Amino acid sequence: MLNLFILGCFLTTFAACDVKVDVHSHYLPDFYAAALRDAGHNPGPDGMPAIPAWDPETHLQFMQDLNITKSYLSISSPGVYISVPSRAATKNATRLARRVNDFASQLKAQYPSEFGFFASLPLPAIEESLQEIEYCFHELDPKPDGVVLMSNSYGMYFGDPNMDPIWEALDALNITIFEHPTGPCTEHNHLKYSNIDGETSTITPEEWRSLNRPVATRQRATPILDFPFDTARTFADLFYSEVPTRFPSLRWIIPHAGGGLLPTLDRIVTFSTLYPGFNMTMSLMMDTLSRSFYFDLAGPWPVDSSIPTLLRWVNHSNILWGSDVPFTAWAAASILAFDTGIEDVFGNSTRSQDVRSNNARRLLQ
Ligand SMILES: *[C@@H]1O[C@H](CO)[C@@H](O)[C@H](O)[C@H]1NC(C)=O
Ligand SMILES: *[C@@H]1O[C@H](CO)[C@@H](O)[C@H](O)[C@H]1NC(C)=O
Ligand SMILES: *[C@@H]1O[C@H](CO)[C@@H](O)[C@H](O)[C@H]1NC(C)=O
Ligand SMILES: *[C@@H]1O[C@H](CO)[C@@H](O)[C@H](O)[C@H]1NC(C)=O
Ligand SMILES: *[C@@H]1O[C@H](CO)[C@@H](O)[C@H](O)[C@H]1NC(C)=O
Ligand SMILES: *[C@@H]1O[C@H](CO)[C@@H](O)[C@H](O)[C@H]1NC(C)=O
């Protein structure tokens, strides 16, 4: 059905053809939703009002209704490590990672042109994550198209030296990393991931969720504010730890057009001069971004006001499209708004079509 549609589309008016590739879409198989519930993520993860319903058939229907030819599925926040770190939690997370990866691989086998996926890792458990990388990229068939990493894993941000073996393994495999925001977490207390070797965790899930969140008594859903800022935080940590230059084969997808990053990126660059020898300049930042970084446009927001700011830093060839289904109830509406807004931004259908689909095809196929 989809393939016939694409063919028809190519044969008629190529330029008007608004098919999309979705790099930011989520899957929640029943066993994953049950695991979230069992681990106390109620009523939904990250203060959301519910765990969204998901099944492959509904996802395929959504794709067909909105001219999405391919979706890259990933597990959203809180990822697969869903209980506060301890040995028992690591065991569960490792098992859950394997299960969601196997599930997505089978789905990809069943729908090879419709679905790709980003593999989940049981971070902050390093050894177990290295084993899962090995399994996913050397045994699993079909393989993942990259990995999804939460912006932090119980306080382990992207610049954490403990992450180096993970970057090394992924770099050697030439992997695309899809960053996904989660709630922020401090590393400066006894509650952080270092208790991973404890028999049991030392903190309740409620205490963990309120870490580093001022106005804790009036918390709204984490995705509103904390998600975009955690993306900016882990990005800054990544650059100040020089991960992109130390591991140059890694490619990164930063969601939501950078989240809180765009208004802060000039500061990240300029303040780097406080650190002697650091040597970050706007043009070096732009070179690195254009070599290794992609930004997806999962909203919700008016694209015609956010994209021009993004274009200060990267060309349209580094911008990808994403829906964030099934987490945003307004996905369908914002997709239609996107189609209107994007033409205004580029005034050039070749470029908007690159953003909708061709850039993602180049990166991921
Ligand atoms: C899907 O593509 C067709 C053909 O280009 C177009 O007429 C239709 O409006 C599109 N639908 C959506 C929801 O984008
Ligand atoms: C691990 O999973 C088991 C079985 O689902 C559950 O009973 C247990 O509470 C979990 N432990 C932790 C620490 O998450
Ligand atoms: C790494 O992946 C990119 C993007 O998929 C591809 O263009 C490139 O050729 C790959 N490099 C190697 C050494 O495999
Ligand atoms: C900073 O980087 C530029 C460009 O790579 C290089 O020419 C310059 O020597 C570097 N300066 C320092 C202090 O490392
Ligand atoms: C965009 O591409 C042009 C031409 O290739 C280049 O001169 C410019 O520096 C690029 N801009 C960014 C932000 O990468
Ligand atoms: C859009 O711009 C590109 C390069 O900037 C150009 O090659 C192409 O012909 C333009 N497409 C349309 C439909 O105007």
Image: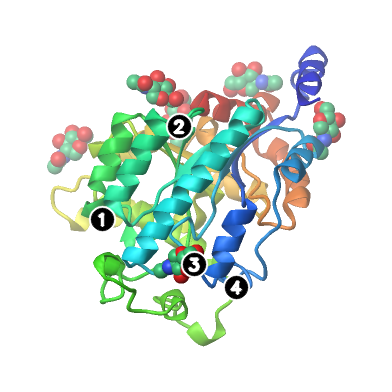
- Disc 4 is placed on an element classified as loop
Snapshot quadrant of residue 307: top right
Residue under pointer 3: 226
- The colour scheme used here is rainbow
Q: Residue at x 79, y 35 (%)?
A: 64
Q: Residue at x 30, y 34 (%)?
A: 171
Q: Residue furthest bottom?
A: 217
Task: Please tell me whether mark 1 sits on a helix, a strand or a loop.
Answer: loop
Decide: is 179 above or below 53.
above
Dots 1, 2 in contact, CB < 8 A: no
- Nearest to the observer: residue 169 or residue 308: 169
Left/right placement of residue 115 relative to residue 88 reads right
Disc 1 residue type (three-letter):
Asp
Q: Position of residue 308 (x, y in %)?
A: 57, 44
The tag on residue 140 is 2
> Which residue is identified by label 1?
160
- Which numbered disc, 4 or 2, marks the residue closer to the eye? 2
Q: Quadrant of ligand 1?
A: top right
